[in-house]
Image (cartoon, helix red, strand yellow):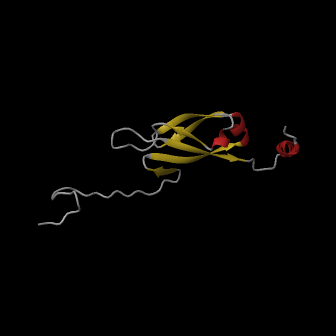
Amino acid sequence: RIATPEGLQPGDALVTIRYRPHPQFRISGNDLHTDYAIELREAVLGTHVTLETPGGSVPLTIPEWAGASGGIAVAGRGMPTAGGKRGDLYVHLRVMLPEAPDERLITLMRNQRKAIYV
């Protein structure tokens, strides 16, 4: 008699799958998470971009003030489920400032800080 883990019968295969972390995507259950850098202008005004995913390119609309909410969910672009469906892809937006200081932006932010809100 061969000892088997609980629930397995002699002749059943026990398979362990290991994967290396992807440099761009993180897995959480059947959902994928990724970070996407956008410029301050795009976060404020919104934009349309093409996002590369493991399943191919996806057009993505980034709405106005998108950086305030932190992210966008793309349904059905995650990992496959046992039932044949797919999890979701969560795009976490990272608002990037210009590399060089922009005097107009600095002036705008200083004026906003001094503004009186009623």
Image x and y of residue 3, in percent: 17, 66
**Which image quadrant: the N terminus?**
bottom left
The image shows residue 107, relative to residue 48, as above or below, that is below
Residue in the picture at 34% in, 39% down? 84
Q: Position of residue 61 (x, y in %)?
A: 60, 33
Which residue is nearer to you in this view: 80 or 20? 80
Image quarter for residue 12? bottom left
Q: Is residue 112 left or right of residue 68?
A: right
| Residue 18 sits above or below residue 29 on the image | below
Which residue is rendered at x = 38% and y = 43% of the image?
A: 80
Q: How many marks?
A: 0
Q: Residue at x 69, y 39 (%)?
A: 43
**Residue occupying the far front of the picture:** 118
Q: Residue furthest left?
A: 1
Image location (x, y in percent) of residue 91: 56, 43
Q: Looking at the image, is 71 positioned above or below residue 27?
A: above
Which corner quadrant holds the C terminus? top right
- The picture quadrant where one finds residue 107 is top right
Q: In this image, 84 relative to 28: left or right?
A: left
Report the front residue among 68 and 24.
68
Residue 104 spot, x, y in % from top left: 85, 42
Residue 90 lies left or right of residue 30; in this view the side is right
